[in-house]
Image (cartoon, rainbow, N blue to C red):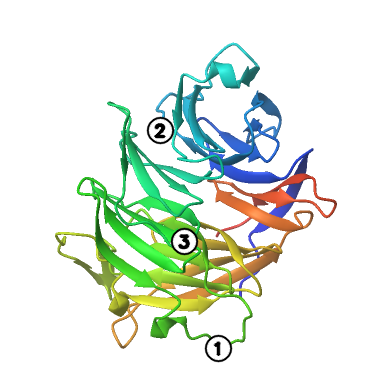
Amino acid sequence: MKETPYTYRQTLKTPAPISCLAEGSSGHFFAGSDDGSVRVYNQETLKVVKAIRGLGEVSSVVCMAYYSASGLGDIWVASNRHALRFTVDTEKMILAKADATLTLELGAENDDVLNELSLNQKNSQLAFCLDSGAVGVVDLSTKQVTRMKTSHDNICGTVKFIPDRPSELVSGGYDSRLLHHDFHQKTILSRFDLGTSPLSESSGVSMSPPFILSSAMSPSGILAAGTADGRVWIGTGGEKMIGVSSGASVKKKRRKWEGLKQDGAFTADVGHGPITALTFFGPRTLFTSTLMGKVTLHEIGGPTADGKLDISPKWTKATTDVNKVNAIIATKDLIIIGGLSETGGGITEVWEKSGDV
């Protein structure tokens, strides 16, 4: 394995655990916390430039695509049963719940809390998933909420839109299932059960079932799902383009995304313990993190002799101060890891690129 091209830069401490991270526009990132706050950091100085307080436990933050060189744009925050939209470009340094420009109640009951939000490429649809296993989409122009007819049998922790598929998304749950939805028709297009598939056989022994804890979607349509038993499931059947030898073979666009097809999928053991955070850094480069802070960069390569893709680790580095990892993002020059310290407080650890990835 190569030497890690990132060096530890700084640790940012907060009173409560960091639950989620999001890259913002114009060189900023957002960190959501269990104490109901969201902090906006400048990536260069690592100073807090703005904050939101008093929301209730924050589980997810997503940023609207914003094309200004200096503006912070708008963000959506998941807090308990609500999704709240904030305009961060204000003169106020500290915003409160009352400053939300829109609040949507998406959890049906008091204990049915939001876990993850996701925005489509056009910022016109907001997907959400809930503890009840439900998955839904909000049309942001009409504010109409559409709930999928099929839910997960347990907590649904992750949901992602599929690139260049205007009506398709994929969700993952603690029932070990991936569900591929047409959210206009509210129907299931395909599904995959990691608990019963032949791909679930692992070379190691794990006491955990393959609950799906995290997911990431590459710009080219490859899906990665992190499980509680230390593996990553990779679905490549929906990839838009595959290079073959010196030439390039472009896959014909199918009527629907085929990322859950078994003949285009494989699993890899990537760490001891739950895979709590994933993020793609380009079409075939994937960062994974275990709960205990083992961060690995993988390259998805191939096709191999049997016509399939595979995954290979390039380097691994352990966190210095994050004791339990909840989130990871990769920007142009930084890897940012958020979670808990040894004493249960909040920690955001920042690594800086010192060589070629």
Q: CA distance from mark 3 to mark 1?
A: 23 Å
Q: Name the residue tied to disc 2.
A: 65
N-terminal of the pair, mark 1 or mark 2, is 2
Near-viewer residue (214 or 316): 214
45 vs 226: above or below: above
User: Which residue is drawn at the image coordinates 47% and 40% (left, top)?
Assistant: 107
Q: Name the residue tied to disc 3.
A: 173
Q: Name the residue tied to disc 1.
A: 203
Q: Amino acid at mark 2?
A: Ala
Secondary structure under the numbered disc 2 in the rendered image: loop
Q: Disc 1 vs disc 2: Cβ atoms closer than 8 Å?
A: no
User: Which residue is drawn at the image coordinates 45% and 40% (left, top)?
Assistant: 108
Residue 151, percent from left and from top: 37, 56
Tell me if 84 is positioned left or right of 204 in this view: left
Residue lying farthest to the top in this orientation: 91
State the image quarter where residue 209 is shown: bottom right
N-terminal of the pair, mark 3 or mark 1, is 3
88 vs 195: above or below: above
Which one is closest to the eye, mark 3 or mark 2?
3
Which one is closest to the eye, mark 1 or mark 2?
1
State the image quarter where residue 80 is shown: top right
- Location of the N terminus by quadrant is bottom right
Q: Amino acid at mark 1?
A: Ser
Q: Disc 3 vs disc 2: Cβ atoms closer than 8 Å?
A: no
Tell me if 29 is positioned left or right of 232 in this view: right
Tell me if 273 is positioned left or right of 116 in this view: right
Q: Disc 3 vs disc 1: Cβ atoms closer than 8 Å?
A: no
